[in-house]
C-alpha cells in the first residue's frame, strides 16, 4: 500500500472515531435532559401541591399573618429577651411575636423608617401572639418597655436582599443553565482534534511523500 493510500485510510478511521467520541456527550445530554424533564415535572407538581397544603394550614391556624406574600417569621417573647433579637426579612413578610415566658411584656417601636406606620403592641401581656406585616424597607428597632433596662430589645431589617446570594443560588435549577461546562469542553476538544487530524493529513499527502513513493514522473 502506498503512503498516500495508507494516510487516507488512517485519517478516515481517526476522524470517524473522534466524531463518534464527540457525539457521545450530546446523546448522553439528550437522555439526561429527557430524564430530568420527566423528573422535574413530577417534582414541580409535588412541590406545588405541598405548597398549597402548607399555605392552607397556615391560613387555618391563623399563623399566616396579614397575607403580605413574603412568608412568615416568628419571634419568641421570652423572659427578658426577644428570640431572635435581630431579624432580616423581605418586604411583605409577616412577623409573629409569640409570648412563651411568664412575665408581662409589650412591643414598643423605638425607631422605624419615615414611611412606616408600625405602632407595635403597647399592651402588656404574658401569653398569646401579635403579628405585623412589614412592607416598607428599613430598620425597625423596638423594645419591651418594662424590661429595656435588662437589654430586652429587638431589631428587624426589611430589605430585598434578605436571604443573600446563597438563597438565590439555591432557587436556580442547574439544568436551567444549559449544557454543563464540562461537556462544552469535550465538544470543543473533539472538533479541535478533528481539525488537527485533517490538517495533518493534508500536509502529509501534499508534502510528506518521498521520492520512492511518488508516482512516476512527479517532481
Image: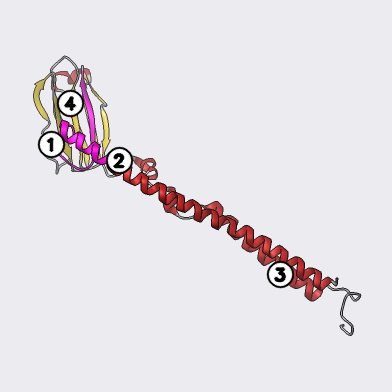
SS at badge 3: helix
Q: Nearer the viewer, mark 4 or mark 3?
A: 3
Q: Nearer the viewer, mark 2 or mark 4?
A: 2
Relative to residue 151, is residue 18 drawn left or right? right
Dot 3, how many residues are within 10 Å of its Cα: few (below 14), some (14-19), or many (20+)?
A: few
Report the residue marked by disc 3: 199
Q: Residue furthest top?
A: 102
Q: CA distance from mark 1 to mark 2?
A: 20 Å
Q: Residue furthest right?
A: 212
Quadrant that contains the N terminus: bottom right
SS at badge 4: strand
Q: Which mark is residue 118?
A: 1
Q: Nearer the viewer, mark 3 or mark 1?
A: 3
Q: Is residue 81 above or below residue 16?
A: above
| Front position in the image: 55 or 98 | 55
The answer to whether one can see residue 161 in this image is no
Q: Nearer the viewer, mark 3 or mark 2?
A: 3
Question: For the magenta stretch, what is the residue range?
Answer: 50-78
| Front position in the image: 27 or 197 | 27
Image spot of residue 134 (x, y percent): 18, 39
Q: CA distance from mark 2 to mark 4?
A: 23 Å
Amino acid at each position: 500500500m502506498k503512503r498516500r493510500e495508507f494516510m487516507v485510510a488512517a485519517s478516515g478511521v481517526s476522524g470517524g472515531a473522534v466524531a463518534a467520541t464527540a457525539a457521545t456527550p450530546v446523546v448522553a445530554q439528550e437522555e439526561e435532559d429527557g430524564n430530568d424533564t420527566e423528573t422535574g415535572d413530577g417534582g414541580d407538581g409535588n412541590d406545588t401541591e405541598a405548597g398549597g397544603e402548607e399555605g392552607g394550614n397556615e391560613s387555618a391556624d391563623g399563623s399566616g399573618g396579614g397575607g403580605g406574600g413574603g412568608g412568615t417569621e416568628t419571634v419568641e417573647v421570652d423572659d427578658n429577651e426577644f428570640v431572635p433579637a435581630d431579624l432580616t426579612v423581605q418586604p411583605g413578610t409577616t412577623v409573629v411575636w409569640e409570648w412563651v415566658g411568664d412575665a408581662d411584656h409589650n412591643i414598643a417601636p423605638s425607631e422605624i423608617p419615615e414611611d412606616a406606620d408600625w405602632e407595635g403592641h403597647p399592651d402588656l401581656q404574658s401569653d398569646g401572639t401579635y403579628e405585623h406585616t412589614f412592607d416598607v424597607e428599613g430598620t425597625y428597632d423596638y423594645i419591651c418597655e418594662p424590661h429595656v433596662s435588662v437589654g430586652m430589645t429587638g431589631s428587624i431589617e426589611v430589605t430585598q436582599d434578605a436571604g443573600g446570594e446563597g438563597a438565590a443560588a439555591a432557587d436556580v435549577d442547574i439544568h436551567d443553565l444549559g449544557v454543563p461546562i464540562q461537556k462544552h469542553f469535550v465538544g470543543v476538544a473533539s472538533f479541535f482534534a478533528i481539525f488537527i487530524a485533517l490538517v495533518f493529513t493534508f500536509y502529509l499527502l501534499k508534502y510528506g511523500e518521498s521520492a520512492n513513493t511518488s508516482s512516476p514522473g512527479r517532481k
